Image (cartoon, rainbow, N blue to C red):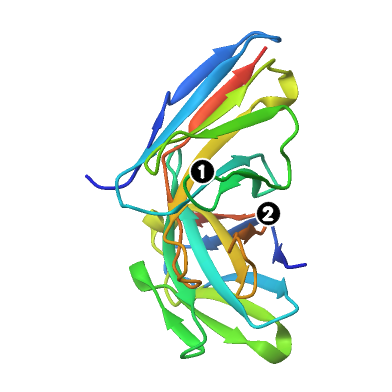
Amino acid sequence: AQSVTQLGSHVSVSEGALVLLRCNYSSSVPPYLFWYVQYPNQGLQLLLKYTSAATLVKGINGFEAEFKKSETSFHLTKPSAHMSDAAEYFCAVIENNNAGNMLTFGGGTRLMVKP
Amino acid sequence: NAGVTQTPKFQVLKTGQSMTLQCAQDMNHNSMYWYRQDPGMGLRLIYYSASEGTTDKGEVPNGYNVSRLNKREFSLRLESAAPSQTSVYFCASRMTGITNYGYTFGSGTRLTVV
């Protein structure tokens, strides 16, 4: 069975600092991996996805993530945090042999950006 | 705008009351899903419908029922609400057959059971 672990339920950075949100997955087969962002009182918006092509994936708003099979990781980074990045971020996985192709989510990481 | 529409956005229920959460998508997606979001637990799947006419249980189905009314609509019913069902509920949809195709989410229904 697939699972996702996000290390750190809360991460605080200063504006302009590097953002690093950690995600590790467990999957019996090569996975498809996603990062979603949720702004306050809104639904989830897709940031980026890994689909077995390039291991470094670029998404919206300057975010990117790197798939590392040896580490079973898919960490999200952004070189310079902006106040508008404050939100909750979810890592999710789909196994490509899952008939229902259901997303399994991590517990989420709330990113706070200090001025 | 195209997307997933959920109604209502907010609801307060008394213990034992029933209600139906509505969800509709206009993207011609085959699969639809209901999740609940609780602090620190991410999103957990309640029920899903892989295609029109089929529904299946997810991780936390107890206390809920669903109906896939047609390809566009997928409703979630609470027959006898309990305080443990206080949560934010999200409906989502996706196109079947494309494994790397991400989900599109609605904006959520915030439900409080008192």
Q: Nearer the viewer, residue A21 or A112?
A: A21
Decide which of B28, A65 is in the foreground and name it.
B28
In-image side of B3 versus B89 (left or right): left
State the mark number for residue B53.
1
Residue B102 in percent (x, y) is at: 45, 64
The label on residue A34 is none
Could you tell me if residue A115 is visible in this image? no
Q: In what quadrant of the picture does the N terminus of chain A appear?
A: bottom right
Q: Chain of mark 2?
A: A
Identify the residue at horizontal 41%, vertical 37% (top origin).
B73
Q: Is residue A5 left or right of residue A103?
A: right
> Residue A13: which quarter of the image?
bottom right
Task: Kindly identify which residue carries mark 2.
Answer: A107
Could you give the CA–CA distance between mark 2 and mark 1, rounded to whole angstroms?
31 Å
Q: Are marks 2 and 1 in contact (CB under 8 Å)?
A: no
Chain at numbered mark 1: B
Secondary structure category for the residue under label 1: loop
Using residue A29 as the reference point, say whether residue B104 is left or right of it.
left
Q: Residue at 44% of width from left, 44% of height from top?
A: A43
